[in-house]
Amino acid sequence: MSDVLARDETTGTTRPARHRTLRLPGVRTWVRVAGAVLLLALPFYLDRFWLQAGLFAMAAAIGAIGLNLLTGATGQLSMGHAFFLAVGAYGYCVFAADGGDGLTGLGLPSWLAAVLAVLVAGVAGGLFSPIAGRLRGAYLGIATLALIFIGQHVLFNARDLTGGFNGRDVPPLSLFGLTFDDREVVVAAVPFGSAEKLWYAGLVLLLGCALFARGVLRGRPGRAMNAIRDHRIAAGVMGVPVARYRAAVFVLSSMYAGLAGVLLALVFQRTVPDYFGITLSLDYLAMIVIGGLGSVAGAVVGAVFVSLLPQLLTRYSDALPLVSDPGTGGIAPGEAARYLYGAAVVAVVLFLPGGLVRLAARRRVSPGSGATPGEER
Amino acid sequence: MSTFAELLLNGISLGSVYALIALGFVVIFRATEVVNFAHASLLLAGGYVTATLHDDIGFWPALLVGIAGAAAVGAAVEFLVMRRYRGSDHSVLAIVTIGVDILLTTELTRRIGTDVLALGDPWGDAVLTVGPVSLAHTRIAAFVAAALLITAFLLVFRYTSWGVAMRAAAESPETAALMGVRLGRVSLGAWAVAGGLAAVAALFLTVFPTPGLERATSLAALKAFPAAILGGLDSTTGALVGGLLVGITESLATGYQSDLTFLGRGLGDLAPYLVMVAILLIRPAGLFGTKELARV
């Protein structure tokens, strides 16, 4: 909408106001409106399985946006994203739980717990800044690998905080008197459980995160980040405080991961340490590479692709060739999904630099203007 | 004291195995400037081939086939994937290797399943006891094999024309190409050598006292990453020192675990990473890595 108004103001200031209202909005606006309506209406039609799958995709999208700010836009390879997801998820549990199950719980209001969990994830990222600000490329990638192992060690051993191997229950979120739990509220003859309610919370969070990241990328910080990725020394010469930017992006990216962790925990309703292993980190890297490095839309597309693919294959495993139920000896749906997106990562980097979003944008944007993925020089 | 000596010797032996893996990692990096995140899956491939064949054709032939198999997988990755990339940015290839790793690891862990595969090594659980110190035969074999292989590799690297070609390619690819070095062959060779070294390492990571080849073996192989990094990615000496440092740290942390219970169980798996972070804080390019210089 805004670009329509802006164009009017630049072309002629004396044009009568009536004229402006008659002008039809562009195709893109219609697509956006239709998409928004569809997303808002889905909880009335989909069953719980698909809503949960969608919520995973939203949480993954938030985390992937954060990783894309770090790896895609600033060129800092991180394999420790799962660690910050874990910090967010477990941080929320610790702050929000009332200690009824024998584990540490501060019993704070759950919205405050969610905010604090995100902040704690940011602090954890900040504590890593002596490393994050100085290392680059593969060195940083492997150094962040340490975070995964430290995280797993803490998750399995700090039983009071994390519940050890069995994990701990996640207290439901409540906001302005509305609790996102399974007590059903009937809206327009559709029973609303936790998945339906969380769906809207997830949409709001994802939209907020996406807009914020877009603002960062399009503004001064985004240019500085791209400059660091493309030529670190030149960026420094032009006055970009390279080390400080690297550390700051790392903190921002871990806060995104923390929020994704909180949302994931709310959807799962239970957090277990095994989930936050190295596989999860690789999944997030796969998401941003497949979707497109350095852009918000790329992160979202990649996250939807990577997190819905296993669910789709599981649901339709009977109808698909080569895929069989888990435990029957054939290729399980989860494995089939991993083959597919492992191959997708290779194929995208070799044949489609810029990822899936570049495919859609190719008609609009002239080729060659896209950011090349990868690390700084 | 004897406990300490045992732990130290075990650590050196384990460290020499890590050094083998890290050496392959460094060789690929030097020859092609690619950081190979698929290294753990090469190792798993070598171990898997050995484990499935040793019943039918005996241990030594199976080991040879395993080494050849892992070398072939490495070469295939180079030939089918790495070579197809036409850009100039080598860091993008690191991301490709992550994709390759996802593919290979999924396939191999699917085949291995929940089994623990024995590699049929001739040493079994025999233990050599000298005075108060006892050491498993497998650990001695690991050290001897790793030392021989590493020495052989360094000699080849230094004196044969293949080694010279590889060092020249690492120094300046363009000049090397103009002097008649075939860069494609050099990088193919680097990947194959790395695969072969990883297969040998797979054997010694899965023999006594570890139960055998299982899905988690690739996690053990990941410890070679800190070994390569803390030594310095572009230094063969660094890979050796890094490997030993990681091995000794792990062995001591595991051995003295009962005295360190306040830090939680499973400290041995964590210690290499903590050492790596500590060293990188002081020397961001690793112990022996060349500090990067850039001309502006």
Image (tube, coloured by chain):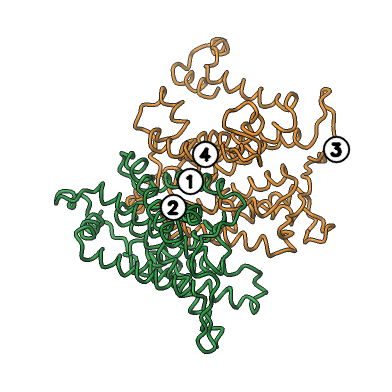
Chain colours: A orange, B green
Tally the numbered discs: 4
Inspect this view and state whether residue A374 appears.
yes
Quadrant for the N terminus of chain A, please: top right
Q: CA distance from mark 4 to mark 1?
A: 9 Å
Residue hosting label 4 = A339
Looking at this view, is A108 or A303 the one in front? A303
Please give left or right for residue A336 compared with residue A295 in the image. Answer: right
Residue B235 placement (x, y as % from top left): 33, 65
SS for tag 1? helix
Of labels 3 and 4, the one closer to you:
4
SS for tag 4? helix
Q: CA distance from mark 1 to mark 2?
A: 8 Å
Residue hosting label 1 = B104
Mark 4, other Cα within 10 Å: few <14 / some 14–19 / many ≥20: many
Q: CA distance from mark 3 to mark 1?
A: 45 Å
On residue A183, the disc is 3
Circles 2 and 3 on the same subunit: no
Q: CA distance from mark 2 to mark 4?
A: 17 Å
Instruction: Please tell me whether residue B118 is drawn above or below residue B84 in the rendered image.
Output: below
- Residue type of the residue flagged with mark 2: Leu
Asked if disc 1 and disc 2 are in contact, CB closer than 8 Å, the reply is yes
Q: CA distance from mark 3 to mark 4?
A: 39 Å
Residue hosting label 2 = B42
Of labels 3 and 1, the one closer to you:
1
- Residue type of the residue flagged with mark 3: Arg
Q: Chain of mark 1?
A: B
Of labels 2 and 3, the one closer to you:
2
Residue A185 placement (x, y as % from top left): 85, 32
SS for tag 2? helix
Please give left or right for residue A211 compared with residue B246 in the image. Answer: right
Residue A146 placement (x, y as % from top left): 53, 61
Residue at the spot x=33%, y=58% of the render? Answer: B27
